[in-house]
Amino acid sequence: MKLQLYNDLSGNLEPFEPLEPGHVKFYTCGPTVYDYFHIGNARPFIVFDVLRRYLESKGLEVSFIQNFTDIDDKMIQRAEQMGITVRELAEKFISAYYEDADSLGIKRATYNPRATDEIASIIGLIQTLVDKGHAYPADGDVYFEVDTFPQYGKLSKQSLDDLRSGARVEVDERKRAPLDFALWKAQKPGEPAWESPWGMGRPGWHIECSAMAHHHLGDTIDIHGGGSDLMFPHHENEIAQSEAANGKLFARFWIHNEYLMIDREKMSKSIGNFFTVREVRAKYAAPVIRLFMLSAHYRSPINFSPETLDQAAHAHDRLRNGWAEIEFAMKTRPCDAVPCEPDAELREELRDALGLFDKCMQEDFNTAGAIGAVFDVIRATNVSLGHPGGIDYEIVKEAADFLRMVDEVMGIIQIGAGDRGDAETEEIESLIAEREDARRGKNFARSDEIRNILNERGIILEDTPQGTRWKRAQDGGK
């Protein structure tokens, strides 16, 4: 594998090989579970799911850790509003996360650690920072002293001097400097809290990821992913905490996806311009949403609108119908003894497209270019299926194998299962078989009735000498 990834730490495109041969250690920031996650959050979840699947398709073992932040200010405020405990709130929205993520075909992490289950690791890491002079207690709180880590700002490409001069002066006499950030927060009345060497309290947000990544993946991880909004200060703080404590490089590759935009503004709960995944998937199938998310390079913003989702839905119909044509041809293949003139030009075109897919994926995970290659394969195969000299089944087989691999990695075609599911496919094919029986029995009224039933459901039938093939109309949605 010759994968190259853009590393935000170096600012360069770099060849990727895991530190431990054959084993990738991959950490990505998960949700704060105080609400349903919105479609903007879905972008990193889908992007990093596909990167993980691509690495696995190349024979690599991937330890994929995605955390749940289940204690912070938002959690406490929301639980109070709902009249439930923070723990009950977390359970509700962790279950909701799994339901929504599963519906989008997002593969479950190797492990999803929760902050509240990692308190011992968090306290241990904070104590190490205190012992090494990188952190200081103050009235039950503990702060990281940024000035003790001269490399602070190396991820976001900001110097300490510039950060100091631009820092907002906060009214907090307990902090030695405005840039210092909380590792541990003293308990306030009514808040959940845990015992610590500094009194009852709870972890700060930034320390959670450092502790969980170290606990589950060790001192140095291969890839750390997240949205670009997390680069500063969250990921910058993770680096400072982890490297100050361990004296080792925290993450070799830092990968950040760009925002999902609405009317040129970042989608965000804080400004209210968001849609939950539940709202979007009520109208659009999971492969449509995944195709939309992957149709732009992960480092480019992407604009969300009904029009762009409809475009993705039509593109998905083309993929799905292209697969249906291939599947039909494979099922109705004539005897192997029937000669067929090999089509050298089409074979070359197909193999060029196959090569382009890998080339795009290996050049900084360019899913947009890779999807273009998938459509090239569909086009080349469709030409072969309509070839007057007969079908070159070697092309069809290669295309079928390729599209199965694409669907395993990207989840954009919905081969075999998905939101519509095998049950619907079986029902459609059962109706088609019934229609065939009706035609053979000259019951044309029932034959026409079944065609009309399927037509109303967006299923188009085409009668051929090899049998009846079917495809879905470009319905633009589910």
Image: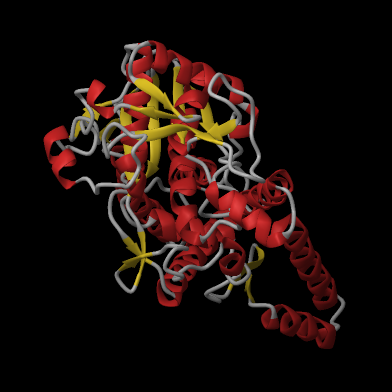
The answer to whether residue 351 is visible is no
Q: Residue at x 72, y 77 (%)?
A: 454
Q: Residue at x 75, y 81 (%)?
A: 453
Eyeballing the image, is 379 above or below 459? above
Q: Residue at x 54, y 64 (%)?
A: 321
Eyeballing the image, is 232 above or below 116? below
Q: In the rendering, at what x and y percent does residue 419 appear?
A: 66, 59
Q: In the rendering, at what x and y percent does residue 473 appear?
A: 57, 75
Q: Quadrant of residue 182?
A: top left
Q: Classify residue 36 as left or right of residue 432.
A: left
Which quadrant would the C terminus be assigned to in this image?
bottom right
Q: Quadrant of residue 323?
A: bottom right
Kindly give the residue lying farthest to the bottom in the view shown: 445
Q: Residue at x 40, y 60 (%)?
A: 383
Eyeballing the image, is 382 above or below 58? below
Q: Nearer the viewer, residue 125 or 366?
A: 125
The answer to whether residue 207 is visible is yes
Q: Nearer the viewer, residue 157 or 14?
A: 157
Q: Quadrant of residue 10?
A: top left
Q: In the rendering, at what x and y percent does residue 102 appear?
A: 64, 48
